[in-house]
Image: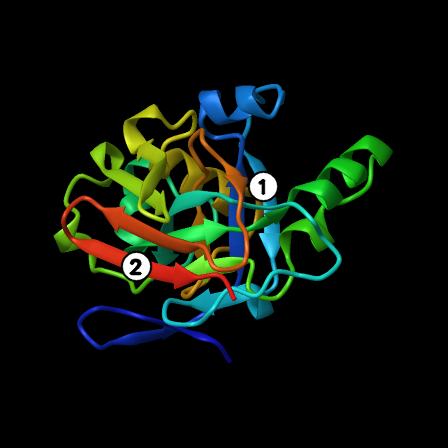
């Protein structure tokens, strides 16, 4: 069973991986997507997890894999129909992640009205830093994070700009699924997504409390 790792040395077994799409208006606009009144949810298999320190391997069936930098939540206390005002009590920690997307396959699937699973769920498509405990990020909804590729800023995320904020995401997911300890939630990406290539170095930073580095094989 895959596990996530905390900076304090603790671990947590992973249950499910939920991802929220179109959660920043500028990113939805750059892809020509409409904004939805409810969160757009998709899932990745646990085989998609890639921990920092491991190389990203691009799938040979795509010619256009994009990075999508995101704040990731880990659920420590599961539940069903979690109230918004209690939602953050269910969070065990925060990390940074990359939702890697085979954009060419996704576009083909969307044009045909087909699911995106192959475009979003391939091995290594859910890159993940170590997690920090909530006390190290006391105001997560005000947090800022960034992604540099080869030393150049590509994405800057401001969690206050989320369309659906963190409590709303947890409350919504728990109204549709029973959340479990070890569930991961990728909370959406800001504008600036772009293709990655072999040899690229991707560096993620969350405030001054967390950094992660990935290399593309």
Q: Nearer the viewer, residue 74 or 5?
A: 5
Residue 98 drawn above or below residue 164: below
Residue at x 17%, y 72% (from the top left corner): 8
For this view, does 114 lie left or right of residue 18? right
> Which residue is pictured at 52% across the width and 66% down the height?
217
Q: Is residue 36 left or right of residue 131?
A: right
Q: Give the number of callouts.
A: 2
Q: Residues within 10 Å of mark 1 (few under 14, many from 20)?
A: some
Q: Nearer the viewer, mark 2 or mark 1?
A: 2
Q: Name the mark on residue 183.
A: none
Q: Can residue 156 be seen in this view?
A: yes
Looking at marks 2 and 1 on the same chain, the residue that comes earlier in the sequence is marked by 1
Numbered label attached to residue 212: 2
Q: Check the image and tell me how it is coloured.
A: rainbow
Q: Position of residue 151 (x, y in %)?
A: 31, 46
* Location of residue 132 with respect to 139 vertically, above or below: below
Q: Disc 2 and disc 1: Cα gap in Å?
A: 25 Å
Pick the front one: 149 or 209: 149
**Would residue 77 be seen by someone viewing this image from the given angle?**
no
Residue at (54%, 19%) from the top-left corner? 29
Instruction: Give the x, y percent position of residue 200.
Output: 45, 55
User: Residue 31: horizontal and vertical position, in percent?
Assistant: 60, 26
- Disc assigned to residue 41: 1
Residue 28 x/y as whole percent: 54, 24
| Residue 210 against residue 25 in the figure, above or below | below
- SS for dot 2: strand
Q: Residue at x 26, y 69 (%)?
A: 6
Instruction: Give the residue furthest to the bottom.
Output: 1
* Disc 1 element: strand
């Amino acid at each position: 069973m895959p596990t996530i790792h905390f900076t304090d040395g603790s671990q947590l077994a992973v249950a499910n991986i939920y991802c929220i799409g179109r959660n920043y208006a500028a990113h939805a606009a750059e892809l020509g997507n409409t904004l939805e009144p409810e969160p757009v949810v998709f899932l990745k298999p646990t085989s998609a997890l890639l921990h920092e320190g491991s190389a990203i391997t691009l799938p040979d069936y795509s010619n256009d894999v994009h990075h999508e930098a995101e704040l990731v939540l880990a659920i420590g206390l599961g539940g069903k129909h979690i109230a918004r005002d209690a939602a953050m009590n269910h969070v065990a920690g925060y990390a940074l992640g990359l939702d890697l997307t085979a954009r060419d396959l996704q576009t083909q699937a969307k044009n045909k009205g087909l699911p995106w699973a192959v475009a979003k769920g391939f091995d290594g498509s859910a890159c993940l830093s170590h997690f920090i405990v909530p006390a190290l990020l006391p105001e997560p909804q005000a947090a800022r994070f960034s992604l540099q590729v080869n030393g150049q800023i590509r994405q800057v995320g401001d969690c206050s700009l989320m369309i659906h904020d963190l409590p709303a995401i947890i409350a919504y997911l728990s109204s549709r699924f029973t959340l479990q300890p070890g569930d991961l939630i990728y909370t959406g990406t800001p504008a600036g997504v772009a293709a990655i290539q072999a040899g690229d170095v991707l560096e993620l930073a969350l405030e001054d409390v967390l950094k992660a580095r990935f290399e593309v094989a």
